Amino acid sequence: MTTPPIVEGLLDFADDVLRAPAPKPAALRRAVSAAYYAVFHQLVRSAARQIFGDDPVHEVDWQVASRWYSHHDVKVVSGWVVNQAGRRQLPQSLQLLLDTPSPELIELAGIVSELQDSRIEADYVASEDLEADEVGFLVCQARRALALLTRLSGDRVSDNYLMLLLGGPRLPLRRAG
Amino acid sequence: MPMSTTTSMNYSVIMTEPLYTPAPLGGTNDRMLAAYADALRGHVIEGFRILEAVVRADWMPQLGDYIRVFVVIDDPPEGTKSWPSPRVSALHTAVRDAAMRFCIVEHIHVRSISLRGVVRVGLPADVIARARAAAERPSAPTQT
């Protein structure tokens, strides 16, 4: 699967921040945000390709569809995978759709969730700064997530995860099967 | 015929209302959070000494009710820039999992801070002092 230029660009930006001898607090916050958005864009692209297919003729369709995904839905659906793996309570329909997530999917969902938490805190918790080690870890996790994403294709539960990213939390899942 | 003045239903509002999102389960109190912090503090988790642990309940519009956990760990060994990511990831997972022992079911966000970063991050002075004192102690903490 091709990687949109924005994904590598965001990670390059984060790497540049970390290479500085003494990164400024605001730069470290931006690096966390960049790491999260790199994963978000690639995840959304994977999900859109699942809907329209892999043929590059759909490039415009992928771009249009990528606007349909929300951070909230990505977080909630990723949380479902983590909860399913941890045998926590989910509605029956979700248990069926996400019944046996692969280790790669569980790890990916966990990283997406952690990156989004970190991104939100980096943007909104002004009273605490980040240290470079933390940010370095999160950038590594983003790269790990991108690698995991390439290994998901063909796995039924992973396909369901990508499908649910598009508005899954707004489906009538309590009532369905 | 005059136009009807009947108010029509705004379906866009209905369709954007999430039907299933994890509701905060609540029930977590300060005593549970303190017990959780105690269970982390001074132990070795995934090979990391937990020099100090701070656990706080918090809320943000984007995250809802959640628990913030700060664990202070040793600095990376001489000559290495940072701890390996897989080890840090395993630490965060273990710290999150430990919350279940105290029936803390809210979403947990873990931050692991190396000793050298505690001031920069802005942890309280007493936490920093305890972490530094713990780092000086040669005793072998217990694995949890």
Image (spheres, coloured by chain):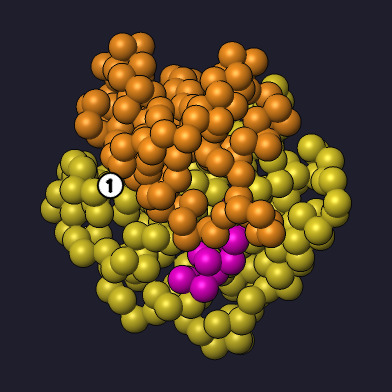
Question: What is the crowding at mark 1: few (fewer than 14 residues within 10 Å), some, or many (at least 20)?
Answer: some
* Front residue (pair A6, A130): A130
Amino acid found under the numbered disc labelled 1: Asn
Is residue A175 placed above or below B121 in the rendered structure? below
* Front residue (pair B66, B125): B125
Question: Percent x, y for residue A2?
Answer: 61, 81
- Residue at 31% x, 37% y: name it: B142
- In the rendered structure, the answer to whether residue A174 lies left or right of residue B121 reads left
Q: Main secondary structure of the magenta part?
A: helix
Dot 1 corresponds to which residue? A83
Question: Percent x, y for residue B38?
Answer: 35, 22
* Front residue (pair A4, A82): A82
Question: Percent x, y for residue A36?
Answer: 61, 53
Letter of the yellow chain: A
Is residue A53 placed above or below A110 in the rendered structure? below
Q: Colour of chain B?
A: orange
Q: Which segment is the magenta one? A: A138-149
- In the rendered structure, the answer to whether residue A97 lies left or right of residue A139 reads left
The quarter in which the N terminus of chain A is drawn is: bottom right
Q: Residue furthest front?
A: B138
- Residue at 37% x, 68% y: name it: A104
Inspect this view and state whether residue B48 appears.
yes
Question: Percent x, y for residue B140?
Answer: 38, 38
- Residue at 45% x, 40% y: name it: B49
Q: Quadrant of residue B108?
A: top left
Q: Quadrant of residue A119?
A: top right
The secondary structure type at the circle numbered 1 is: helix
Inspect this view and state whether residue B62 appears.
no
